[in-house]
Image (tube, rainbow, N blue to C red):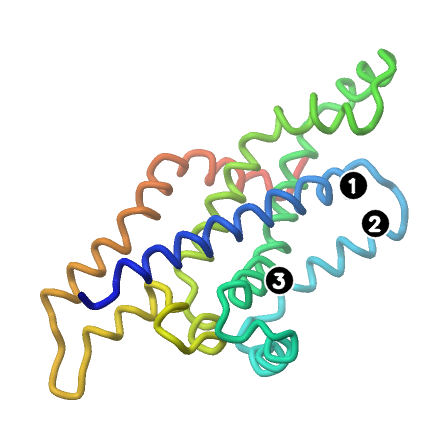
Amino acid sequence: DSGFGQYFFNTLVVTACVIGIVLLLVPPLAYAIVRSRGRATSAIFRLFLLGLAIPAQAVIVPMFYLISEAGLYDNLLGVILPTAAFCLPMSALILSGSMRDISPELYEAMAMDGASPRRMFFQLVMPLSRGGLSTIVVFSALQAWNGFLFPLVLTQSDSTKVVTLGLYNFQTAHGIDIPGLLGAVVLSMVPILLVYLFARRALVQGLMGVGGK
């Protein structure tokens, strides 16, 4: 009755879209970082790494104006895009470290067989980077599911609220619905806890390989 089902569904949508954006953008970027020796690629990688030093709290005001001017305020897309953007730097670092573990001899063998860079990417790099891919999926899911700041500032109506904001509905001016709040907390923990339990080994292995060889 409190609308928790809608908040739960919104959180699922945000999480799935963030994971999709990260999986679409990060693997080609990490592949280019690992295989390219150009200065432009190195500069782009450093620019991405700079994002690790910028907290979301420092850019929330310009982010609010940017999302408002784009007409995405109080829209789930306005939460998805900045959340995915802040997942990209760490995801690129993790996956590029995982791809550096692939032996150069494998690239040379495929090149001798006449394989193009695109074929190497899909038939060699992607299958051998499952650990890194699993890591960035879990990392992105955690960031999106537990996101609080962007939904708080960039949404307003009940139809766009997510679980982290929906928990406030159990607190009123007259008190706190403790049983309802605890039940909602448990329900909000279950999906991401299951993801972590099944993928924790890949997450740890991927983070251990961040530095590459």
In the rendering, at what x and y percent does residue 66 appear? 64, 77
Neighbours of disc 2 within 10 Å: few (<14), some (14-19), many (20+): some
In the rendering, at what x and y percent does residue 57 appear? 53, 77
- Chain-order first, disc 1 or disc 2: 1
Looking at the image, residue 47 lies above or below residue 25: below
Looking at the image, residue 32 lies above or below residue 149: above
Quarter of the image for residue 31 reads top right
The amino acid pointed to by label 3 is Leu
Residue at the top extreme of this rendering: 113
Q: Residue at x 53, y 38 (%)?
A: 206
The amino acid pointed to by label 1 is Ala
Neighbours of disc 1 within 10 Å: few (<14), some (14-19), many (20+): some
Q: How many angstroms separate mark 1 from mark 2 (CA)? A: 7 Å
The amino acid pointed to by label 2 is Thr
Q: Residue at x 60, y 48 (%)?
A: 22
In the rendering, at what x and y percent does residue 122 appear? 70, 26
Q: How many angstroms separate mark 3 from mark 1 (CA)? A: 20 Å
* Number of marks: 3
Label number found at residue 52? 3
User: Which residue is nearer to you in this view: 211 or 37?
Assistant: 37
Q: Residue at x 46, y 44 (%)?
A: 138
Circles 1 and 2 in contact, beta carbons < 8 Å? yes
Residue position for label 2: 41
Residue at the left extreme of this rendering: 179
**Element type at marker 1?**
helix
Looking at the image, residue 80 lies above or below residue 106: below
Residue position for label 1: 32
Q: How many angstroms separate mark 3 from mark 2 (CA)? A: 18 Å
Quarter of the image for residue 177 reads bottom left
**In the picture provided, is 165 more to the left or to the right than 57?**
left
